[in-house]
Image (cartoon, grey):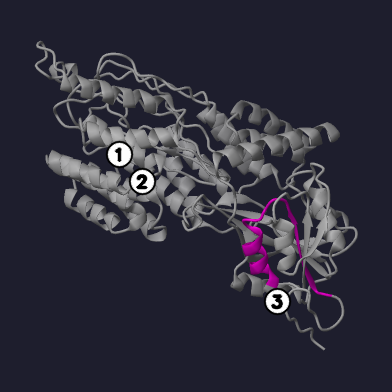
Amino acid sequence: MPRTRAGAGAHADGPPALSGCLIVRDNAKTIGPCLESLRPWVDELVVVDTGSTDDTPRLAAALGARVFHFPWVDDFSAARNESVRHARGEWVFWMDSDDVIDAANGRALRTLADGPHPDTVFGYVVRVHCTGPDPALTDDVTVVDHVKLFRNRPDLRFEHRIHEQIIPAIRRAGGGVAWTDLFVVHAGYDHSPEGQARKKERDLRILHRELAEKPGHPFTLFNLGMTYADVGEPGRAAGYLEESLRASVLGDSQRRKAYALLAFCRAALGDAAGALRTCDAGLAECPEDVELRFRAGVYLHATGRLREAVAAYERVLAGGGPRYFTSLDRGVAGFKARANLAAVHADLGEWDPAERLLRAVTAEEPNYRPGWQGLGDLLLRRGRLDAAGAVAAELVGRPRLAAEGHLLAGRVAVARGRADDAGRAWEAALALGPTEPDVLERLARLAFEAGRDGPAERALRALAAAAPTDGAVHHNLGTVFLHARGRARPSPRSSGRSSCARTRSRHGCAWGTPCGTRATAPGRPRRGGPYSSPSRVTTRRRPRCATSGYRSDAPAPVRSSFGPRVATRTFVGAGDPAPGAFRRRSAGRAADGVTGHGGVDCAPASQVRKWTTRTHGRGA
């Protein structure tokens, strides 16, 4: 007789078929949504608490879980195995305490668990969708493969103190795994700087302890390299990744990711050519790997091999190939590759394909801010002000992108010589209270270089609150104060005009504009070098600007892209035929990237003051 089910812990015939197993500790904020999402689809919930000081155990029990206690011993596998030990189901499904599963995936999970199953299949791969700080945004999702459903057998237990794995035990037992399209959402991740700092400290402590216990283990070496890359130490990360590759054998699932991380680290150290060689080595071993191909496109672009970069991105977009274990930003094989390909076409002067790609990007992922930035920049660069204005109006009507729309509207107004309209547009952007550092930085820059001290100061104050240790932000804020004070108390000699206005030259080097090219507006920077905040990576220096005769102290990072959030480069200002300067943005768990923002086609003819470019380390 078929088994009938009536919720967690209730089963009509024989032992339960499916046990949901979790380990928890101080997860009172997330355990409720997690268990409520899983409870309808399993026959029992097993929760092992490793030392909560909040209400987590009580909340879990109230939701029908069998709660057990286990002392924390710096070992995730030990805790997971304790939960499996208490499971009574034929199959075990494990989740993190901040995961949720929706009804469609829960129903499919139940159908899968009820069988039938090939005798050789001991486990099933279920993906984890790791969201960014705003789970509602679909442009910032990393997809990670895990064997989350496996047979409840005494010889199948997790291994490794951290980043625990069940697949080695499955292989030793002579079993295999099968792929599914199921996924859970890792929605409760702590993205706060404090939470990230605690997590990285814990991870490194446990990993070094494991390496002492298992010297030379390739998986532990890989995880050390990955974690040091996450905390912004690419040199140290590269050493562990190289050791991992030497210690592992062909076919080990982490090798392809080790190549990708090593390429990222070499690019972060200023060696784009070395990063490209690393991609080539990885692709020789894993020719179907999407991330390695994507990175190859980034580094080919960085080294000026544009036609080869086009071919690399087109191959990414062609898709195909077998599935393999990976952790990948879901945009890499789609809209982010298209955005990067558009940037290459723009550098080749191929405006029509670039515009078509960018419009496809915004259609595929309407929340992807760099796609809209690139489209607006390209339209301005081509002098299509009506089209750029239409894009700005569309963005203003989208609540999440309204500030972006006002920024673009201000740039269009400046291009039309309407400085007052530009000022009102930027004031409207500020009134929305944007919190994204990228938006605030560009808003501050535009107002700063347009001589609009009020909005520039407010944007810089908000940016300083978001990035209190960024020296460039405070330098620019100080420059705004000095300029405002100079205007309020003019000297007889200057008659109230700044030294910039009195000594402007025909050309200027503007923030975001490549050195050696003409800026849109005349003027030259104020005397005195900018404060250069320390960068966490060593990068190339920008070449001396041939026209303005000064050199920016901010490093020019190589074009790089790693794993959960891939930022792409956009375009420079209207009428500038040269490629835009790249800078790094912070990245998420599985993607890190590069971007160059629009050139300063918005600075008025009265003056261009010197803006100090922020340095960007890799985010956690």
Earlier residue among tags 2 and 1 = 2
**Residue 441: which quarter of the image?**
top left
In the picture provided, is 153 more to the left or to the right than 317? right
Question: Percent position (x, y) of residue 124?
Answer: 73, 64
Give the residue number, with chain letter if any, for mark 2.
Answer: 434
Q: Can residue 600 be seen in this view?
A: no
Instruction: Kindly indicate whether the residue at mark 2 contacts the one at mark 3 (C-beta within 8 angstroms).
Output: no
In the picture provided, is 106 more to the left or to the right than 438? right
- Count how many numbered circles sit on residues in the image: 3
In the picture provided, is 333 more to the left or to the right than 517? right
Query: For the view shown, which residue lies furthest in the top direction?
Result: 493
Earlier residue among tags 3 and 2 = 3
Give the residue number, with chain letter if any, for mark 3.
Answer: 111
Query: For the view shown, which residue lies furthest in the bottom direction?
Result: 1
Residue type for callout 3: Thr
Residue range corresponding to the magenta coloring: 16-39
Q: In which quarter of the image is the C terminus?
A: top right
Q: Between label 1 and label 3, give the one nearer the viewer.
A: 1
Q: Which residue is drawn at 69% across and 71% down?
A: 39
**Camera-side residue: 574 or 413?**
413
